[in-house]
Image (spheres, rainbow, N blue to C red):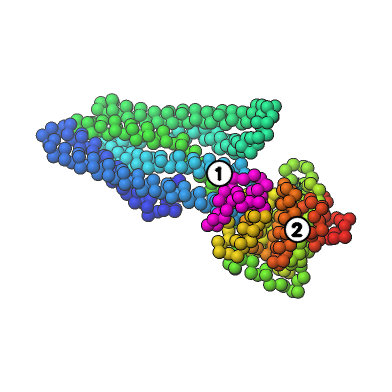
Amino acid sequence: MFAYFIRKMPFRFTLAIIVGVINGVSAVGVIEVISQGAVQRNHLPSLAWTFFGLCFVQIASRISSEILLISLTQDMILDFRVKSSVNLLESEYKKLESIGKPGLTAMLTSDIDMLTQSAHLVPNVIGNGIVIVFSLCYAAFLSLSGCLILLCFLAAGACIYHILERLPRAQMEQVREQTDVLYGNIRAILEGLKELQLSSRRKTYFLDNVFIPSVQRFRSLYSKAMIGYSFAVNIGGMLFIIAIGFLFFLFPFLLKIGPAVSISLSFLLLYLIQPVSNLVGSLPDLRRAEIAMLRLRHLNVDLAAHREQSVDEPSGDIFLSKAGGAEALICFVDVCHQYPSQSDDKTFMLGPLNLSIREGEVVFVVGGNGSGKTTLAMLILGFYEPHSGHIELNGHIVSNSRRVHYRNLFSAVFADFYLFDEVLSGEHDSNMVLAQEYLNKFDLTHKVEIKKNRFSTTKLSTGQRKRMALVSSYLEDRPIYLFDEWAADQDPVFKKVFYTELLPELKKRGKTIIVISHDDQYFNCADRVIKLQDGVIKPLLDSKAS
Ligand SMILES: Nc1ncnc2c1ncn2[C@@H]1O[C@H](COP(=O)(O)OP(=O)(O)OP(=O)(O)O)[C@@H](O)[C@H]1O
């Protein structure tokens, strides 16, 4: 964390340290004044002024240093939050799929929360650290041999802490790994709430065999780690306290020092107990924060390495001009895609596919479950990169550097769509009139309005939400539309509006439309039907087959 401050915010961090140094010096000054007061009773009035002055400087510098450090730590957390989210949004979809939602959720919530929780320790740790350093300097000034004894004990304490911390540190890293498992299971509870509440047997099985064991493992690892830390912190810290006691009780006999120095050193040693205990007590939380920070940094480095390149050109422009007399808008040339294998099982292979879709065409993609329709959609939309072969748009190869622009030519409603409150269209856009018309046709006007580019509500039934997602996609006004089983859970009346009114209306506006569908009664609404079976295109026993 400290390395981060030095790297990212050197000026403010240096300022915080300088103010912290003033705090440390004034703290030592207070001890010196009290010790002088104990032996020079006749100077008490002038010492009192110095004492109060130093107290004021100490409090003012402590508050200023803490304010600076709070702002530094909060900026760091903000930076991590924004950077992680932006990196995530700019990373290859395949990479995010491979990390998985539980892992990503744990990093964006638990790890960042851990940083937030431990951020309040930073001002204390730095403040106490500086006070300890200055106290040791003052101890050296009072008695070099006394300070050396103190430093020897301090070094021994640090070594013992370092050795004792090895095991709990490894366990803390396991705790963090177990957090991913726990988040996965919590997700399962939240997303499978209805299924679990519906079946007592499933609920009991899930709780007894999945959830409770994962929580127990977390508890056990966490307890072991914290017990280990308790030993490390207390034994390591105790050595320093023993050193203080040793010097306090024995130094008048062991070291040749006068009564004034003896009193000053005694005050100093007593004063040191609190900052040392605070500092050592913060170490386990700082270690947890370090683990969280390392994971976030690795995630960011990993995501940045898989960031999709985006060349500086207006969205999609290059693709809108035809290259080399290309006839098709989208063209798949020997495209193959295979999912990474989790075990020795054979993974699903899509392709080799050769297909072309012309501008303004309405193409239906049909096929049984697991035949590869969604995988094909992900390739068409540029979320997956072909493992072999390539995709062309207007004759231009969709290279990695152009994938982001390519994708911006599409609007899609996914089978597992997410409905945003915000609608991305100008309020005075002529599309708005049509959107209102479609809200009407989809029987949504009594439920929802579009005001200031927002839906007035999204708390609707699944079918209604999907109709709103369609209106939202429609308003995006892109050249190519893809609908993945949009009509699957719609009433016949809305299916009819979709197939016989919305698709022809989009086609009339020159849009190219790809529809994944199981509705064979509407196959006649397509210009062409492509049938997938086991990842390859098969002839459809129909006149419109590809
Ligand atoms: N992320 C993934 N990792 C590994 N295999 C996957 C993944 N997603 C899909 N598959 C496999 O790829 C095959 C095709 O899946 P896909 O979702 O493309 O089929 P589909 O035709 O859309 O099916 P459905 O009609 O059920 O939606 C399936 O056998 C599936 O098991």
Image coordinates of residue 506 in percent, x first then y, are 70, 63
The answer to whether residue 438 is above or below residue 168 is below
Image coordinates of residue 273 in percent, x first then y, are 33, 31
Q: Is residue 330 visible?
A: no
Q: Nearer the viewer, mark 2 or mark 1?
A: 2
The span shown in magenta is: 442-470
In the picture provided, is 383 more to the left or to the right than 282? right
Three-letter amino acid code of the residue under disc 2: Thr
Of callouts 2 and 1, the N-terminal one: 1
Q: Is residue 36 visible?
A: yes
Three-letter amino acid code of the residue under disc 1: Met
SS category of the residue bearing label 2: helix
The residue under label 2 is 500
Disc 2 from disc 1: Cα separation: 46 Å
Image coordinates of residue 300 in percent, x first then y, are 55, 51
Q: Residue at x 39, y 28 (%)?
A: 238
The answer to whether residue 408 is above or below residue 520 is below
Q: Residue at x 85, y 59 (%)?
A: 545
Image coordinates of residue 208 in percent, x first then y, are 65, 26
Q: Residue at x 82, y 55 (%)?
A: 531
CB under 8 Å between discs 2 and 1: no
Q: Nearer the viewer, residue 356 or 528?
A: 528
| Residue 107 - label | 1
Crowding near the residue tagged with mark 1, few <14, some 14–19, many ≥20 C-alpha atoms within 10 Å: many
Say if the magenta span includes residue 12.
no
SS category of the residue bearing label 1: helix
In the picture provided, is 416 more to the left or to the right than 129? right
